[in-house]
Image (tube, rainbow, N blue to C red):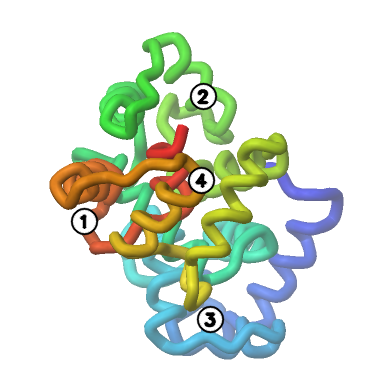
Amino acid sequence: MKFEDGKKDVYEEVFNSFDVDHNGYLSVRELGKCMKALGDKYTAKDIKFLIQCADKDENGKMDCDEFCMTASIMNLVSMDNLKQLREVFISFDLDGNGTINCRELSRCMEKLGQPLSKAECKELIASADKDEDNCMSFYEFVIMVKSEKKDLGEDDQSLREAFNLFDKNGDGSIDKEELRKVLETMEGQNPTEDELDEMFREADLNNNGRISFEEFQSIVN
């Protein structure tokens, strides 16, 4: 991952100041104190989640490089948004190895009703693949999603506004009845119960009974 000039040095200094036992890692407790000092109030469960997201060597701790990546990512997304993106990423990571390859991306985009050619999948992964391993890690996936959202056109912005309108509790997702209202309002559709069930089932990739904005986008488009 590329950092702005001087940014990684600052993150490394912060890491070293909270690595009190100087073992090259931050434990859940140390990372919690660090994030609190930076002004972010997270629960112990949130801290464990952050370590899980960054922990490439799966040792349950966060080394300096992993901390630098995490600090950079948290400047881009909220904790709630990160959790939503994690669920989407896991649904794409079909073999569960922590990365998305060209084949997995192709199969999932086809399931979303937006099939991509092999060349398009390779191009998309290459644009996000910072470490050049021909796969997309979770943080690379987050950066790709956030960079694409910066380029939202008027149509996508309209979808976002509609989504937010029906996301009554502001939790970043909508349920089946909210989806029905969206379709009736925006598309003039009056889907039957079976049609709604099928549409919801196809869009709800992680089977959590809710539809995220990315999943909603695939339905309308």
Which amino acid lies under the numbered mark 3 shown in the image of this protein? Answer: Leu
Which amino acid lies under the numbered mark 2 shown in the image of this protein? Answer: Leu
Which amino acid lies under the numbered mark 1 shown in the image of this protein? Answer: Asn
Residue 68 image offset from top left, x and y in percent:
63, 60
Q: Is residue 86 visible?
A: no
Between label 4 and label 1, give the one nearer the viewer.
Answer: 4
Are circles 2 and 4 on residues that touch, CB within 8 Å? no
Q: Nearer the viewer, residue 69 or 213?
A: 213
Furthest residue in direction left, as rendered? 194
Q: Residues within 10 Å of mark 2 (few under 14, many from 20)?
A: some
Which of disc 2 and disc 1 is earlier in sequence? 2
Dot 1: what SS? Answer: loop
Q: CA distance from mark 1 to mark 2?
A: 25 Å
Q: What residue is pinned by disc 1?
A: 207
Relative to 101, 1 lies left or right = right
Which amino acid lies under the numbered mark 4 shown in the image of this protein? Answer: Met
Q: CA distance from mark 2 to mark 4?
A: 30 Å
Q: Residue at x 44, y 79 (%)?
A: 46
Q: What residue is pinned by disc 2?
A: 124
Q: CA distance from mark 4 to mark 3?
A: 45 Å
Relative to 136, 158 lies left or right = right
**Quarter occupied by residue 157:** top right
Q: Residues within 10 Å of mark 1 (few under 14, many from 20)?
A: few
Dot 3: what SS? Answer: helix
Q: CA distance from mark 3 to mark 2?
A: 33 Å
Q: What residue is pinned by disc 4?
A: 186
Which of disc 2 and disc 3 is earlier in sequence? 3
Furthest residue in direction right, as rendered? 5
Q: CA distance from mark 4 to mark 1?
A: 24 Å
Q: Residues within 10 Å of mark 3 (few under 14, many from 20)?
A: many
Q: What residue is pinned by disc 3?
A: 31
